[in-house]
Amino acid sequence: MSTAAPWKQLILKALETNSNIKHSTYFQLATVAQDGRPSNRTVVFRGFQGDSDRIKINTDTRTRKIEELKHCPFAEICWYFTDSWEQFRINGRVDMIDETNSDPSKLQERERSWFASSATSKLQYVGAHPGLPYISEEPPPQVYIDPTSGPVSTFCLLVLDPYQVDYVNLKSDQRVTFFSTQNANGQKSWVAERVNP
């Protein structure tokens, strides 16, 4: 159980305000490489997990971020909304849900994310191995994915469980940091502190 995250409403409002801009659902996800260096890439927001404040991201199990998250499960999102001049930096722990996960409810969540994906997005998971050298000038063979079949083995759902959110509104010159706390019953709540921009 958790109480409503006040920053979540700010994101939902920013998404609505910036809905005319296709890239408003894209953000940067930074992880820690095995050598301790930062590793960053752009990913697509796939919604919140149910009514929670946990953020969903689809990825390929063959990408570098998977090994990085196995090494260090913490990550940070940086999300900037260009029309409303708002930035969110969201720190949290990432849960990786691939086909080997033993939790039936998590596997159902992975399946829901798969079926919510577009046909074009699904094809990325059966293509060439991401990050390996390109070796052929031949066009890739046509691949067909049965729209009624479940996720392919390379499809992975990442769920970021936030513990700190830094919000900056450049139009109003406001900055607020939200910190999560947990009581003895495991219930998560949020504390907001206004800080200098």
Image (cartoon, grey):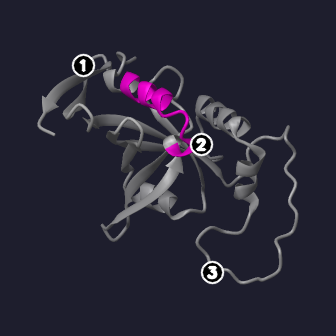
Q: Position of residue 100 (x, y in %)?
A: 63, 47
Going by the numbered disc 1, the residue's amino acid type is: Asn
**With respect to residue 54, does 141 lie above or below?**
below
Q: Quadrant of the N terminus?
A: top left
For disc 2, the neighbor class at 10 Å (few under 14, some 14 to 19, many from 20) is few
Q: Quadrant of the C terminus?
A: top left
Tell me the SS state at disc 2. loop
Which residue corresponds to mark 1? 183
Which residue corresponds to mark 3? 133
**With respect to residue 13, does 195 lie above or below?**
below
Which quadrant of the figure has residue 117? top right
Tell me the distance, in whole angstroms, between the alpha carbons under discs 1 and 2.
Answer: 28 Å
Tell me the SS state at disc 3. loop
Q: Circles 1 and 2: CB distance less than 8 Å?
A: no
Image-based side of 24 in relation to 133, left or right: left
For disc 1, the neighbor class at 10 Å (few under 14, some 14 to 19, many from 20) is few
**With respect to residue 90, does 152 lie above or below?**
below
Which residue corresponds to mark 2? 101
First in sequence: mark 1 or mark 2?
2
Going by the numbered disc 3, the residue's amino acid type is: Pro
Q: Position of residue 144 (x, y in %)?
A: 88, 54
Residue found 42% across the figure and 30% down from its top: 14
Tell me the distance, in whole angstroms, between the alpha carbons under discs 1 and 3.
Answer: 49 Å
Image-based side of 24 in relation to 165, left or right: right
The range drawn in magenta is: 9-23
Image-based side of 89 in relation to 14, left or right: left
Residue found 57% across the figure and 37% down from its top: 46
Q: Position of residue 98 (x, y in %)?
A: 61, 47
